[in-house]
Amino acid sequence: MKNTMKTMKVAAIALVGMLGLVACQPAPKKTAAPAGDAAGAGNAQPLVIRFGADATYAPFEYTNDKGEVVGFDIDTAKLICEEIKAQCSFVNQAWEGIIPGLQAKKYDVIMSSMAITDERKQSVDFSNKTSDTPNAFLAKEGANFEVSDAGFKGKTIAVQHGTVQDFYATKYYPSAKVKRYKTTEDAYADLISGRADVVFSDAMILSEGFMKSPQAKGFAILPTTIPNNADSAVLGDGVGMAVRKGDKELLDQLNKGLDAILKNGKYKALATKYFGDNAKYLYASDAKF
């Protein structure tokens, strides 16, 4: 009996000790929702989205004097995040590595004026269109090049490497020399120095970026523009946000936010702030500057 009572006392003491240890354990910490996961109800963490952009494409995406990624696309992303109650941040990524960076999960969304093409759809899923602008040529004032293979024969066309303008110029202007650059800014530099005859890029980039810079004096946009439907297989069907293949939940959230700002006037107000009357060319097959 004494042994039994002793055993019961020992067990009771052990049980009390175990309960004390459990009570002293720290509460589990809340972890942030994985980027790209939608927020649930109750105590779930908010949706957190990291956007990747090649910040050399003013005024759509570029860096300010503080090194921050800013621009029209960035502010559009912020409006979308406000609509879907998401926290967003921005990563500067060189264009040549922008899809690999997405696939490596350095960020969750590409928001970088990326044309929606069938080739890219093999690697990423696209949102609805955020814009659909034509393509244009920048040259010295008075150049008056005919926009054709014959008109560009022997001339140097400067393009950003890996863009739809690169692919289009290569296909349609074989008599020209297509010179490829890491950034559009580098292409501008060779045009200014005389090492290139024209820069081929997005019409809004040329009109609202270069032509509103101090370097624009003595240069002009050629009157002939190239609409995306001139060859949609090459030029794509407008511009959209890109996510990793199969990330439908995030894509649905992005489309929801985009649809909201297109309908409530916030997108239009932002476009007018950036581009004034030229905002009408964000969804246009032609443009006159």
Image (cartoon, helix red, strand yellow):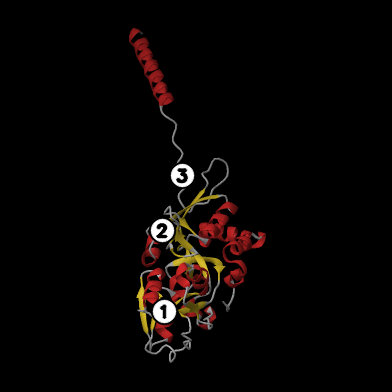
Disc 3 from disc 2: Cα separation: 22 Å
Residue 172 point in image, percent of width and height: 43, 86
Dot 3 corresponds to which residue? 32
Residue drawn at (44%, 36%), measured in percent from left and top?
A: 29
Q: Residue furthest bottom?
A: 150
Q: Would you name the residue on which mark 1 appears?
A: 167
Q: Residue at x 45, y 56 (%)?
A: 64
Disc nearer the start of the sequence (1/2) = 2
Instruction: Name the spot of residue 53 as percent of width and height, x first.
Output: 44, 61
Q: Is any atom of residue 154 visible in this view?
A: yes
How many residues crowd around disc 3 within 10 Å: few (fewer than 14), some, or many (20 or more)? few
Residues marked 3 and 1 touching at CB (< 8 Å): no
Residue receiving disc 2: 92
Task: Give residue 101's position: percent from left, percent from top.
Answer: 38, 60
Q: Nearer the viewer, mark 3 or mark 1?
A: 1
Quarter of the rendering containing residue 102: bottom left
Q: Quadrant of the N terminus?
A: top left
In the depicted view, which residue is nearer to us: 81 or 104?
81
Outermost top residue: 2
> Residue 5 occupies which quadrant of the picture?
top left
- Which residue is pictured at 43% across the width and 89% down the height? 149
Q: Secondary structure at mark 3?
A: loop
Quadrant hosting residue 178: bottom left
How far apart marks 3 and 1 lie (CA) works out to 41 Å
Disc 2 on helix, strand or loop? strand
